[in-house]
Image: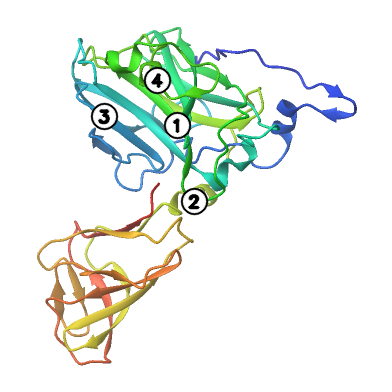
Amino acid sequence: TAAKIAANSVDSAELIDGAIDDSHMASISGRRNIIINGAMNFWQRATSFSVSDNIYTADRFLTEFSGLGAFTISRSTDAPNGFGYSYKIDCTTADASPSAGDMLQIFNLIEGYDAQGVKKGTSDARTLTLSMWVKSNKTGNMQVNLRDANSRMCGGTYTINSADTWEYKTITYAADTSGAIANDNTTELRLEMPVGSGSTWNSGSVPTAWETTANGDRNAGGTINLADSTSNYLNITGIQLELGSTATDFEYRSYGEELALCQRYYQILVDGGADKAIGVGFYWSSNEVDYTHRFVTDMRASPTLEQVIGNAYYRVSAAGDNFNGFSGIQYTSTRSCNMYISSNVSGTAGYASDLRTRNADSFIAFTAEL
């Protein structure tokens, strides 16, 4: 049975001069969870990864990795009641004595547009509360930080009390009247979850008040090194970051709404399989085919193209032209782009054709990640 263990107490709602306090208001008004994909439902790129530095795994979750043994990250169906999936980190090569600079941590990056309610850097700055479910074979303390675009940070810890048991954890972060964050589409706030580190990252103290970021403080409260045995694992799900000093029940957004939030940063056009439709293009000239693609939702910024290229992986059907991949994209905005092919095609200018995949490994996506 999952044990529900909170790191801080739950305050009751209080009426003060006829107004409801912040923590209760957070539970009854609007969208509460600042984190996207906190239930770990969306893994558009893949569902299993060998960890390296600076890769997105589950949608919106990014790695920072340097020399700390070896790990895999995967989508797991081991989850507490109310959740279908969790984010699982497995140690595959042990490192019981990390070098000073070794580190593995997981980020969730938050746009300035989505963080304005925090009112950071103003006299009305708000506290924030993190809640999540965790499970590990290890017991001890783990640190989770908030960092902003002004090189400021605030941290807190939670304790894993029982091995191999789902536990519910919360951390409340102080308000910060310094370090205003921009109202734009850049990374202005980030959630940072170290799971093991060397002395460069744990030689200081936990910054329970906002401070200028100091590397030695970023995992000072972490007593668990997930890399010290290949038996080690950590599962996380139900991550919620909300205004106020009280954790509320996890906010379940609809599947379609959460997917669209993820697709603002990354969206797939085709994902494997032969004879999957790409769209309708035309011969701009005898040796160039153009196709205008409309993104399924507006993206955060003009995206770049990701694709798997291989011999005759794609096809201009009407002309029977097989090509290896798109030559690039142009005239790009947050809403659409023009994809073009300028090799391995030959036809009559002005003629149209559908474009298709021809290989099980064909893959086309667009990324506008933070």
Residue placed most toward the observer, 65 or 326: 65
Circle 1: is it few (<14), some (14-19), or many (20+) Cα within 10 Å? few
Residue furthest right as drawn: 17
| Disc number lying in front (2 or 1) | 1
At x 70% / y 32%, what residue is drawn?
Answer: 124
First in sequence, mark 2 or 3: give its number. Answer: 3
Asked whether, in this view, residue 273 is left or right of residue 188, the answer is left
Residue placed most toward the observer, 150 or 268: 150
Query: Residue 317, how many percent across, how many down?
Result: 21, 80
Would residue 270 be seen by someone viewing this image from the given angle?
no
| Disc number lying in front (1 or 4) | 1
Residue placed most toward the observer, 315 or 173: 173
Asked whether, in this view, residue 171 is left or right of residue 135, the answer is right
Circle 3: is it few (<14), some (14-19), or many (20+) Cα within 10 Å? many
First in sequence, mark 3 or 1: give its number. Answer: 3
Q: Which residue is mark 2?
A: 185
| Disc number lying in front (2 or 3) | 2
Distance from Cα at disc 3 to Cα at disc 4: 14 Å
From what the image shows, is residue 91 above or below residue 122?
above
Distance from Cα at disc 1 to Cα at disc 4: 12 Å
Callout 3 amino acid = Phe
Callout 2 amino acid = Asn
Q: Which residue is mark 4?
A: 218
Q: Which residue is mark 1?
A: 151
Image label count: 4
Q: Which residue is mark 3?
A: 65
At x 42% / y 65%, what residue is drawn?
Answer: 295
| Disc number lying in front (3 or 4) | 4
Distance from Cα at disc 2 to Cα at disc 1: 18 Å
